């Protein structure tokens, strides 16, 4: 089963997502709350996908972190966000994400987005 890093600054939300994804059979290699930690953990564990909140602790937001992941690793990113304003969506689209899910979301919706993203990444392998 796929390995996922969860980047979410709200600890209760992150733990809830982690528990639900584990029940679905995903392996969670890390739960982090900053953009810097996302980059560090990706370099250490090479996950299959990153679930990325847009608002993260620290200086780097989730969109900046996703752009760095795209440039350096090519790992698919699915955004988790409560923000759907035009500026935010424009910034998201610049990173060519594998998808995004608006909060609050259902587990079914999140699972489908993850599966689509993983399917896309598997098809893009040489």
Image (cartoon, helix red, strand yellow):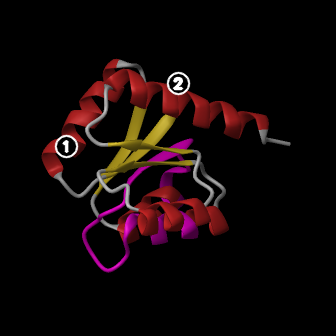
* Residue 40 visible (yes or no): no
Question: Regarding mark 1 in the picture, which secondary structure is present there?
Answer: helix
| Up-down relation of residue 76 to residue 123 (above or below) | below
For this orientation, the residue located farthest to the right is 126
**In the rendered image, which quarter is residue 4 located in?**
top left
Q: Which residue is mark 1?
A: 13
Q: Position of residue 110 (x, y in %)?
A: 41, 31
Residue 56 part of the magenta segment: yes
Badge 2 crowding class, 10 Å Cα cut-off, few under 14, some 14 to 19, many 20 or more, is few
> Which residue is found at the position 49% from the left and 36% from the top?
3
Residue 89 coordinates in the image, percent (x, y): 47, 60
Q: Residue at x 38, y 19 (%)?
A: 24
Distance of label 2 from label 1 (alpha carbons): 22 Å
Q: Is residue 105 left or right of residue 78?
A: left
Please give the label number shown on residue 1: 2
Magenta span of residues: 43-68
Q: Residue at 29% across / 65% down in the picture? A: 56
Q: What secondary structure is marked by label 2?
A: loop
């Amino acid at each position: 089963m796929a390995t996922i890093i969860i980047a979410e600054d709200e600890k209760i939300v992150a733990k809830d997502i982690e528990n639900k994804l584990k029940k679905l059979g995903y392996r969670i290699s890390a739960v982090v709350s900053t953009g810097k930690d996302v980059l560090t953990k990706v370099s250490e564990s090479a996950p299959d996908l990153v679930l990325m909140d847009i608002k993260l602790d620290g200086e780097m937001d989730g969109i900046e972190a996703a752009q760095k992941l795209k440039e350096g690793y090519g790992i698919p990113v699915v955004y988790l966000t409560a923000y759907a304003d035009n500026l935010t969506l424009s910034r998201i689209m610049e990173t060519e994400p594998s998808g995004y899910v608006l909060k609050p979301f259902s587990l079914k919706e999140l699972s489908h987005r993850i599966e689509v993203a993983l399917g896309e990444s598997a098809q893009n392998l040489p």
